[in-house]
Amino acid sequence: MYQLPNTVRNFAFALIIIGAIGVIYGFLSVPTLEEIKNSAHPVVTELSHHSDATVAPESDEHALHVLHQLQNKPWAALYVAIFFFMMISLGVLAFYAIQHAAQAGWSVVLFRVMEAITAYLPFGTLLLFLFLVFSGLHFNHIFVWMDAELLNPESAKYDELIANKSSYLNVPFFLIRAAIYIIGWNTYRYLARKWTIAQDSASDNKNYFKLFKLSAAFLVFFIVTESMMSWDWIMSLDPHWFSTLFGWYIFASMIVSSVTTIALITIYLKSKGYLENVNNSHIHDLGKFMFGFSVFWAYLWFSQFMLIWYANIPEEVTYFVTRMNDYKLPFLGMVALNLAFPLIILMNSDYKKIYWIVILTGIVILVGHYIDIFVMVMPATVGDQWFIGVSEISSVLLLLGCFIYIVFNALTKAPLLAKRNPFVKESENFHYYNID
């Protein structure tokens, strides 16, 4: 059985405390309207050093617009971190379901690691749902379509396009859909964990076959709800824009981040003397998935970008114009982090079994996909009033601390080997033909 070291526990708590303090500071440090007009606030000063930001108010109306964007900034930073870590846990759950539905043999020795990562899902989805509720109650203005004035034909803010989408984009239906997604995902996660633990002491394979059938059904539910989730929670931040590829694009970012997290935690546990049945071939396969899904992400990124850019339809291309003009460094930088680096490093078969190379590549991939989510969220919520500051860093630290504590604590709840799985011997003896 795995025992949670005090160093891991203390490190997680330290991240949570530091992150929480920073998040609170981020909310308290939002400048006032007068400070924006006079550029007499540290946040405004920081923005003035950002070449892409326009902070010098040309009018009271512009100053008020900047104020609203800066008020959104700590909320948006927190939302990016909440979504990112929830996305990792959800992606691992989907990858775990794929292993069961495919009756894969190689990955059985990794099941407890996957289950531990999915233990974060109830907490992560609850946190995200509460954020959506706060948005619906107008604690923040992340989702612009929630402004009732946009639906009022007599208002100067009336937006016909958003009004036409109001049958789908309205707060009650939005929250109902979110609840359905979250309940469905967590129900599968609960049953899968329950049946795999029960299988350890069972005298037959009934639990295994029940989970096989449930996993196949869950994957159908997942692929529908994941697409709708991406429309609701990310794409609706830009309600004038849409992409028919967006669900797949979010899935690609989700799955590569998830497999990378599995690899990093597996290597850490092996370094501490656990997971003795995991060998270089298992790490090699995780490296292949990291490589393959990185290429898959890049294919979808290029397909979406190239087709929209080439067609040059104003209501579509504005999405990329905003990001190219105001977020050029993170927008283009994430392509290098998410494609060029893993492509160059992991193309070599031998490198996929060298732990420190997999760790380095994994960290780069996770940073790159955090930036990917950042670039999806920030332009619609803070415009050009962005920089990586206390709110962004603290939000990541807070959620990372929660993630580490929940995942590693979950590892202590069951043996690290699913010993009664029908394919456990195949997994223990798994050997890729050219791996030593």
Image (cartoon, helix red, strand yellow):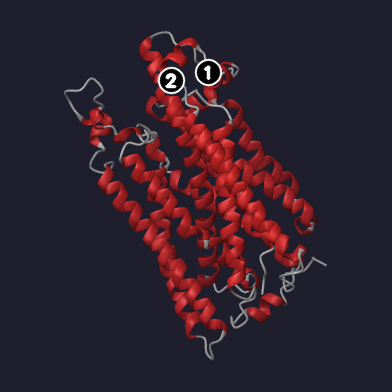
Circle 1 — which element?
Answer: loop
Q: Nearer the viewer, residue 431 or 96?
A: 96
For the image shown, how many numbered marks are present on the structure? Answer: 2
The disc labelled 1 sits on which kind of residue? His
Is label 2 in a helix, a strand or a loop? loop
Looking at the image, the residue that sits furthest to the right is 436
**Residue beneath disc 2:** 32
- Marks 1 and 2 close (CB-CB < 8 Å): yes
Q: Is residue 255 left or right of residue 182?
A: right
Q: Which mark is residue 166?
A: none
Q: Which residue is mark 1?
A: 41
Quadrant that contains the N terminus = bottom right
Vertical comparison of 241 with 359: above or below: above
Circle 2: residue type: Thr
Q: Residues within 10 Å of mark 1 (few under 14, many from 20)?
A: some
419 or 279, which is in the foreground?
419
Name the residue at 44% across, 64% down.
Answer: 219
Q: Indicate the position of residue 132 as horizontal and vertical percent values.
A: 37, 45
Residue in the image at 63% along x and 59% along y: 262
Q: Quadrant of the C terminus?
A: bottom right
Q: Is residue 203 above or below residue 246?
A: below
Name the residue at 47% across, 85% down: 206
Label 2: few (<14), some or many (≥20) within 10 Å?
A: some
